[in-house]
Image: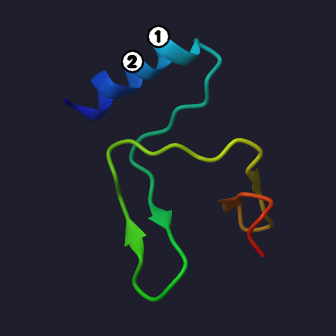
């Protein structure tokens, strides 16, 4: 399934106001843990920090 088609299906499920991005990099904790998945979900309540990176409130 193409990323564009996946985004369309997610909008159909979550609504037109859902924030859906594609072509983004996900940096996980640890050395060389950067991934570029076709689809990723950011945890509810995650807020961008000063560098515009999102993390759940439970992360330090």
User: In the orientation shown, which residue stands out farthest toward the bottom?
Assistant: 31
Q: Give the position of the N terminus as an image quadrant.
A: top left
Residue at (65, 17) in percent of width and height:
17
Residue at numbered disc 1: 12
- Please tell me how crowded label 2 is: few (under 14), some (14-19), or many (20+) other residues with Cα within 10 Å: some
Residue at numbered disc 2: 8
x then y, percent, for residue 52: 70, 60
Q: Give the position of the C terminus as an image quadrant.
A: bottom right
Q: Is residue 29 above or below residue 16?
A: below
Q: Is residue 28 above or below residue 25?
A: below
Residue 19 position by quadrant: top right
Label 1 sits on a secondary structure element that is: helix
Residue at (45, 45) in percent of width and height:
40
Residue at (33, 27) in percent of width and height:
6
Give the left or right position of residue 49, taking residue 36 as reference. Answer: right
Give the left or right position of residue 26, taking residue 2 as reference. Answer: right
Label 2 sits on a secondary structure element that is: helix
Residue at (74, 69) in percent of width and height:
59
Give the left or right position of residue 9, taking residue 21 as reference. Answer: left
Residue 9 position by quadrant: top left
User: In the orientation shown, which residue stands out farthest toward the left?
Assistant: 1
Give the left or right position of residue 10, taking residue 5 as reference. Answer: right
Front residue of 42 and 52: 42
Marks 1 and 2 in Cβ contact (< 8 Å)? yes
């Amino acid at each position: 399934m193409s990323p564009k088609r996946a985004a369309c299906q997610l909008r159909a499920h979550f609504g037109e106001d859902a924030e859906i991005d594609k072509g983004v990099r996900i940096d996980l904790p640890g050395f060389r843990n950067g991934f570029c998945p076709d689809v990723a979900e950011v945890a509810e309540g995650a807020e961008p920090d000063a560098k515009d990176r999102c993390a759940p409130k439970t992360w330090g």
